[in-house]
Image (cartoon, grey):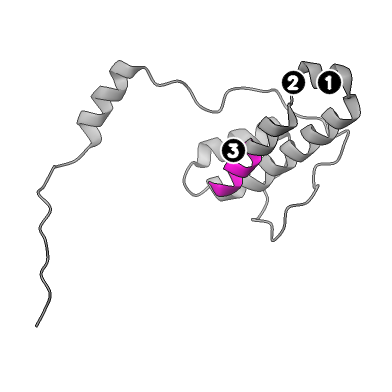
């Protein structure tokens, strides 16, 4: 999650938007290349917890499955053809969030304080 947060902070600070594309297309291309490769590096990290999400990432990147890299690098080179973009996650309706909280919260047991052993 720290890698993801750092990547998100990078995207925010880079000002990735249409204005960047229009004013500085080379910088925009560099930012996009780094972002795509960061997402590619994250794909094997999320796979054990969210296998369908990892598969969707690879499909959208049009890239093969990979192992966890030892260092971040540019593996998907400029000119790589990406797949069709789609949302990875759907917004959770607040009504359903309450239903799922009640359904999956589990039993609420009192916390028992453990004393020290003498």
The verdict on residue 2 being magenta is yes
Q: Which residue is mark 3?
A: 55
Would you say 26 lies left or right of 81 here? right
Tell me, yes or no, whether the two marked residues, 2 and 1, touch with CB atoms within 8 Å. Answer: yes
Mark 2 is surrounded, within 10 Å at the Cα level, by few (under 14), some (14 to 19) or many (20 or more) other residues, namely: few
Q: Residue at x 73, y 37 (%)?
A: 36
Task: Estimate the spatial distance between the alpha carbons at disc 3 and disc 2, rounded to whole Å.
Answer: 26 Å
**Circle nearer the N terminus (1, 3):** 1
Main secondary-structure element of the magenta-colored stretch: helix
**Numbered disc 3: secondary structure:** helix
Task: Estimate the spatial distance between the alpha carbons at disc 1 and disc 3, rounded to whole Å.
Answer: 29 Å
Q: Between tags 3 and 2, which lies in front?
A: 2
Would you say 69 lies left or right of 94 here? right
Range shown magenta: 1-8
Q: Which residue is mark 2?
A: 17
Q: Which residue is mark 1?
A: 21
Q: Residue at x 78, y 51 (%)?
A: 73
Front residue of this view, candidates 91 and 48: 91
**Numbered disc 2: secondary structure:** loop
């Amino acid at each position: 999650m720290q890698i993801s947060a750092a990547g998100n902070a990078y995207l925010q600070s880079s000002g990735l938007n249409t204005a960047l594309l229009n004013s500085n297309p080379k910088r925009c291309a560099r930012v996009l290349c780094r972002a795509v490769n960061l997402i590619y590096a994250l794909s094997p990290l999320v796979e054990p917890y969210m296998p369908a999400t990892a598969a969707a990432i690879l499909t959208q990147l049009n890239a093969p499955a990979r192992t966890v890299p030892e260092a971040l690098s540019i593996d998907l080179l400029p000119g790589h053809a990406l797949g069709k973009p789609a949302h990875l996650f759907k917004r959770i309706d607040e009504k359903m969030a309450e239903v799922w909280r009640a359904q999956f919260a589990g039993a609420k047991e009192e916390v028992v304080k453990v004393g020290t052993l003498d």
